[in-house]
Image: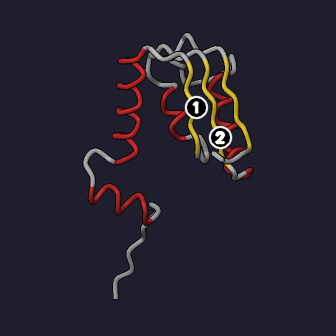
Amino acid sequence: MTLLRVTEPMEDRMEKAQFSPSLSKQRVKYAVDRIKESSATFLVDFGCGSGSLLDSLLHYPTSLERIVGVDISTKALTRAAKTLHTKLSNNATVPVQSSHLKSALILDGSIA
C-alpha cells in the first residue's frame, strides 16, 4: 500500500484540476478589470470571509480609495483585519500597488 501525502486542501486541488487559471485568480482579474473600467474609488465585498479578494486587490494598481469587507463570521473577519492591517501598515514587506487607497474597513454584519 502506498500512502500519498497531500498538503493542499481538497477544495484547492479540485479547483486546480477543473479550472485554469484557478477560480480565485479569475475572480480577482474580473474585479480588477471592472474597477479599472469604471474608475471606481469605493468597493464593498459582501461575504468577504477572510478577505482574500480585498488582499489580492492590494497587489494591483487601481483607482480604489476605500475598501470595505462585510461578513457574518467574526473569526474570518479577524483574519481579514490582521492581513489588511499588516499589508497597509508602513512596515509592510509586500508593496501595496493601490497607491490611492486611503482606508480599509472590516464590518461584522450580513447583507440583509
User: For numbered disc 2, what is the local secondary structure?
Assistant: strand
Residues 92 and 49: in front is 49
Image point 27% across, 58% down: which residue? 18
Q: Residues within 10 Å of mark 1 (few under 14, many from 20)?
A: some
* Residue furthest to the front: 112
Mark 1 vs 2: CB contact within 8 A: yes
Residue 108 appears left or right of 20: right
In the image, residue 76 sits, relative to residue 26, either above or below, namely below
What mark, if any, has residue 74 been given in the picture?
A: none
The image quadrant of residue 37 is top left
Q: Amino acid at mark 2?
A: Val
**Residue corresponding to mark 1:** 44
Query: Could you tell me which quadrant the N terminus lies in?
Result: bottom left
* Mark 2, other Cα within 10 Å: few <14 / some 14–19 / many ≥20: many
x, y percent for residue 12: 41, 57
In the image, which disc is placed on residue 70? 2
- Element assignment for label 1: strand
